[in-house]
Image: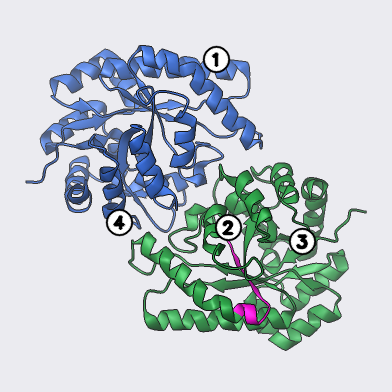
Chain colours: A green, B blue
Amino acid sequence: MSDLSRLSLNTATTKRWTLEQAVAGCVAAGIPAVGPWRDRVAEAGLENAAKMIRDAGLRVSSLCRGGFLTAADPEGQRAALEDNKAAVVEAETLGTSELFLVVGGLAPGEKDIVAARQRVADRLGELVPFAADHGIRLVLEPLHPMYAADRALISTLGQALDLAAPYPASAVGVAVDTFHVWWDPQLQEQIARAGREGRIASYQVCDFNLPIAADALLSRGMMGDGVIDFATITGWVRDAGYTGDIEVEIFNQQIWDADGHQVLAAMKDRYAELVLPHA
Amino acid sequence: MSDLSRLSLNTATTKRWTLEQAVAGCVAAGIPAVGPWRDRVAEAGLENAAKMIRDAGLRVSSLCRGGFLTAADPEGQRAALEDNKAAVVEAETLGTSELFLVVGGLAPGEKDIVAARQRVADRLGELVPFAADHGIRLVLEPLHPMYAADRALISTLGQALDLAAPYPASAVGVAVDTFHVWWDPQLQEQIARAGREGRIASYQVCDFNLPIAADALLSRGMMGDGVIDFATITGWVRDAGYTGDIEVEIFNQQIWDADGHQVLAAMKDRYAELVLPHA
């Protein structure tokens, strides 16, 4: 039997499952942790979701996700701040310290990426004290540059670490998601830096499939199906001192259409084969 | 009348045109330079192509493209070197000093991006003396990270400059293509560095369209149709001291399907409106 003690199911991987189904699936598969998305938590009801996961004996590795901080207008900025504060409370209630932030892209019609990035920094500064008061770390997730305009203006781990720099590592961390960062020529040094700074809040694994899916969001693949060298990247994360959960988060139509239990079985096999030996 | 003296048509923009048609189109439109692709040059015959462009009074801003240097086997490496030497001779014959290199992706089935990048460096080292003997500068083009696996393992301007560093600026330069680099948080500083090092060999403009096209290669758009801030990036290139040609290179099915003369008219308008004032 492989050691699955660090494996976590991000619920996006089994998109059609309710949170209850995902929790039951993890228990049946011997997966000890879950990283829920907020929509599935809301659907179950926050307190009920927390109890359901706790009663099943699972850990919550993270909550996905807050963010979308780039609104240019005051109302949009207020709304984003309120939504992120709600996400902080949800994370606290669920019993995880790690709240993912996908920071958002350009405002509608905007082209000034420099100004938009400054708004991310400004909103982050406003959100940190609230999150810290609740014991929640804001996890900046660099997304693949193909999503820079419409999803996340943080495109590299180095950039995420620069944004995190003004804050304690307990307040702002970074995520290493193989899909988003595998191509980065500075990856090894920035993972090492993230480790030195104590900011690696999550390691997420999934593959980068080719050709890129017609809906570019859905090019994430099961480990081993794409181009990513999990041995090397996982080794860099290990060498950086990370010993936390390893989440599998896959957006992929074929995987979403498959039976969830079979997906979890494949995920365990690939994790044991490609990730675990290097973690 | 706008000053079109630095504008160049990359022939990929008018993909259905032969070189002869592209040359005639440029002359009719008052565009003084052309950046031909090798397939269209080969089709016309090298000497004939050179004469045709010269007789039309056009400059050749660059030749697209050599590269694909990442073969892992000795025969593949020999073939790549031969093909790139042929491209050097073609560039020389056409009367341009700038040969674009799209360096290639992972070898079939390969996942070791670190090793593949080392092969790029190795092949570059073998090619530089030959190119320099012919007065040709090898132009490393960083491609958008979405093409890292299958097209170019150089994903950022900084990485291209690191690869160029062992060689004189007259032997190895870099290209700044807005589509590929607009998202890079280090873009301003790396453009400035490229300028200081005298390595900006080409400035190519086209937009980044959303949503990403189903064939991700075809997401390039006419300036103004996508998300790129041409004023800012063009200003950075200007401030870096670049005074050379500005090529328009667009892969886009709709533009390819349109009448070439109308494409050139739109290209001139957008260039005059969005690029020229900041160049």
**Amino acid type at mark 2:** Leu
Secondary-structure class at tag 4: loop
* Side of A251 where B57 appears, left or right: left
**Amino acid type at mark 4:** Asp
**Pointer 3 and pointer 2 on the same chain:** yes
3 vs 1, front mark: 3
Magenta part of the chain: A131-142
* Side of A220 where A76 appears, left or right: left
Q: Position of residue B68 (x, y in %)?
A: 50, 27
Nearest the eye: B149 or B13: B149
Q: Position of residue A150 (x, y in %)?
A: 45, 63
* Side of A87 where B144 appears, left or right: left
Q: Position of residue A93 (x, y in %)?
A: 71, 83
Q: Name the residue beneath numbered marker 3.
A: A244
The crowd level at tag 3 (other Cα within 10 Å; few <14, some 14-19, many 20+) is some
Nearest the eye: A70 or B180: A70
Q: Name the residue beneath numbered marker 1.
A: B78
Separation of disc 3 and disc 1 at Cα? 46 Å
**Label ID, residue A218:** 2
Tell me where residue B7 sits by quadrant.
Answer: top left
Nearest the eye: B104 or A196: A196
Q: Name the residue beneath numbered marker 4.
A: B225
Mark closer to the chain start, 3 or 2: 2
